[in-house]
Every structure is written in structure tokens, then in C-alpha cells.
């Protein structure tokens, strides 16, 4: 098990540990930029793809009939699951992220019913997003993506990390950023040392 995975063992509710884990895989400036641009792309397209799967329900009040298209897997996983987790993990950043996620859900529901061939656009964006991510890690970070060490943690944390990148860029939450950087650099050094021993 890699040192970064051990670092992540602080748990899904330990924000400094979560950020340090993810930062360990996103330290090259170009890869950070790629991440900031294409993680939202992947999340948006994933939301739309999942929105094709309607949730089973037996009865819905007449008052809610106009909104039944929102009863889908994208709404459940992204609009409820991701947004809820972010709000609980850090409410200050969560109140920034949650409305964006809900907008992703809403926009996709509308577009799926109004744009012909919309799923083709979603899948194209989804595939391109992932290809660029792997290029960023392979050519610039020179390290496999975080999802290869911890799939669930990486997929769930990736969009929230983009929010924190913006927060840090504005000069906010400096203490949290310093904590993250110190721990991430320690993880990176451990990773490099482990690789040297393999040679």
C-alpha cells in the first residue's frame, strides 16, 4: 500500500487528510490546470449520463408530476450524495459547491428532453475529459491518477478539490492550504523514495 493511501486513512470526514491525499497527485501546475478544467467536464457529463436512469417509484403526488424527470440516478448521486457529503465535510466550501451540482442536474434534465442527440455530446465530453486527465498525469505529473490508489475517494473528492483550488487562489483558508501543502509534499517524497527502492 502506498504512503498516500496510508495518509488518506484519516477517513472520509477528515478534510485536511482528504486534501493532502488529493494534492499529492496534483502538484504539477499544468496538471492542476488540466484538473481544474476537465474535472468539472467529467462531473457534468457524468451527471447527464446518470440522469438517463430513472429511479423506480410507484406513486408520485400530482403536484410533483412536473418534476418527475428529476427522479433519476444523476440527481440522487450528484445532487444528493455529492452535495450532501460536501456540505457535511466543510459547509463553507459546500455552500459553494452544492448549488453548482444542483445546476448540473437541472441543466442536464432540461437538455436531455430538449436537445436531440444530447447523449452523444455527453459521452464525447466524458471520454475526452478522461483522456486529457490521464495525459496530464502521465506527461506532466508523471504519476498515476489518485483513483488507481483509492477509486471511491478520488472520484468523490475530485470536484470538491477544484472548489478548494479556487478558494486558495483567492487567498482564503490559508492555514488549511499550508497544512495541505506540507502533508502533500511529505507524501510526494515518500512516493519518490519508494520508487527509488524499486529501481
Image (cartoon, rainbow, N blue to C red):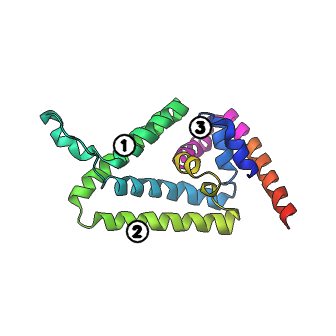
Q: What separation in Å lies between label 2 and label 3 (alpha carbons)? A: 31 Å
Residue depicted at 52% across the width and 46% down the height: 156
Upstream in sequence: badge 1 or badge 3: 3
Q: Between residues 55 and 176, which one lies in front from this camera angle?
A: 55
* Mark count: 3
State left or right for residue 97 relative to residue 2. left
| Residue 192: numbered disc | none
Q: Between residues 175 and 15, which one lies in front from this camera angle?
A: 15
Q: Residues within 10 Å of mark 1 (few under 14, many from 20)?
A: some
Which of pointers 2 and 3 indicates the residue nearer the eye? 3
Upstream in sequence: badge 2 or badge 3: 3
Q: What separation in Å lies between label 1 and label 3 (alpha carbons)? A: 19 Å
Which of pointers 1 and 2 indicates the residue nearer the eye? 1
Q: Which residue is mark 1?
A: 76
Q: Which residue is mark 2?
A: 124
Q: Secondary structure at mark 2?
A: helix
State left or right for residue 73 relative to residue 30. left
Q: Which residues are magenta?
A: 158-180
Residue depicted at 59% across the width and 46% down the height: 165
State left or right for residue 154 relative to residue 107. right
Q: Residues within 10 Å of mark 2 (few under 14, many from 20)?
A: few
Residue projecting furthest to the left: 62
Taking the magenta stretch, the answer to whether it contains residue 174 is yes
Q: Which residue is mark 3?
A: 12
Taking the magenta stretch, the answer to whether it contains residue 42 is no
Amino acid at each position: 500500500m502506498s504512503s498516500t493511501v496510508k495518509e488518506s486513512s484519516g477517513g472520509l470526514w477528515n478534510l485536511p487528510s482528504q486534501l493532502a491525499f488529493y494534492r499529492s497527485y496534483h502538484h504539477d501546475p499544468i496538471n492542476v490546470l488540466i484538473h481544474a478544467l476537465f474535472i468539472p467536464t467529467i462531473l457534468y457529463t457524468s451527471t447527464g449520463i446518470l440522469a438517463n436512469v430513472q429511479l423506480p417509484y410507484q406513486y408520485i403526488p400530482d403536484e410533483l408530476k412536473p418534476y418527475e424527470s428529476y427522479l433519476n440516478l444523476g440527481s440522487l448521486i450528484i445532487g444528493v450524495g455529492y452535495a450532501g457529503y460536501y456540505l457535511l465535510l466543510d459547509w463553507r466550501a459546500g455552500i459553494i459547491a452544492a448549488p453548482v451540482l444542483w445546476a448540473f442536474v437541472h441543466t442536464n434534465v432540461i437538455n436531455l428532453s430538449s436537445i436531440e442527440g444530447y447523449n452523444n455530446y455527453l459521452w464525447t465530453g466524458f471520454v475526452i475529459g478522461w483522456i486529457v486527465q490521464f495525459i496530464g498525469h502521465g506527461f506532466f505529473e508523471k504519476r498515476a491518477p489518485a483513483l488507481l490508489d483509492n477509486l471511491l475517494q478520488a472520484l468523490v473528492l475530485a470536484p470538491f478539490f477544484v472548489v478548494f483550488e479556487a478558494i486558495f487562489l483567492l487567498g482564503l483558508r490559508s492555514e488549511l492550504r499550508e497544512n495541505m501543502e506540507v502533508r502533500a509534499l511529505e507524501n510526494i517524497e515518500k512516493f519518490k523514495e519508494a520508487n527509488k527502492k524499486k529501481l
